[in-house]
Image (cartoon, rainbow, N blue to C red):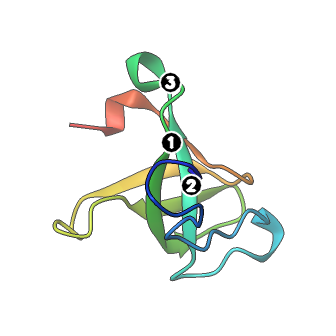
Amino acid sequence: MQGMGEGDDCPFEFNFDEKIFKVGDTVSFRVTGSLDGFPFVGALVEVHDAHVIIAGDPLHPEVLYRGTRESRPVVDESEIN
C-alpha cells in the first residue's frame, strides 16, 4: 500500500497476527475468484476460533463478511455483493 500517493506511509495500521485478533482490529483481507489479488481493508466485528467476521465498508457497517482466521483473512467471493 506504500507508494500509492505523495507520502510513503500507509494510512492504516493492520494487525497481521491472527493469534491475537480482537474486535476492532483493522485487517487486510483477500477475496477469492475474480477479486483475487486485490487488497481489501476491514474491521473485525467478531473473532472465533476458525473464522472472523469483517465489516468491509465503513459507510455500510451492516454489511459483514465471514473470513478465515489467518494473518490476511480470505473471504469467499460469494459473500461480496
Q: Quadrant of the C terminus?
A: top left
Q: List x then y, in percent, for residue 15.
A: 69, 70
**Within-10-Å neighbours for mark 3: few <14, some 14–19, many 20+:** few
Q: In this view, does 74 lie to the left or right of 11?
A: right
Q: Which residue is drawn at 45% across and 59% down?
A: 6
Residue 30: percent from the left, percent from the top?
54, 39
Graded by Cα atoms within 10 Å as few (under 14), some (14 to 19) or many (20 or more), the crowding at tag 2 reads: some
Q: Residue 36 carries which label?
A: 3
Q: Distance between the residues labelled 2 and 1?
A: 6 Å
Nearer the observer, 5 or 35 = 5
Is 57 situated left or right of 23 in this image?
left
Mark number displayed over residue 9: none
Mark 2 and mark 1 residues within 8 Å of each other at the beta carbon: yes
Residues at discs 1 and 3 in contact (Cβ within 8 Å): no
Kindly identify which residue carries mark 1.
39
Single out the mark in the foreground, 1 or 3: 1
- Say what secondary structure mark 3 lies in: loop
> Can you name the residue that lies furthest to the front here?
6
> Where 4 falls versus 26 (above or below)?
above
Task: Report the residue marked by disc 2.
Answer: 28
Image coordinates of residue 72 in percent, x first then y, are 66, 49
Amino acid found under the numbered disc labelled 1: Pro
**CA distance for labels 1 and 3:** 8 Å
- Relative to residue 74, is residue 7 depicted above or below? below
Residue at screen point 56% across, 50% down: 1
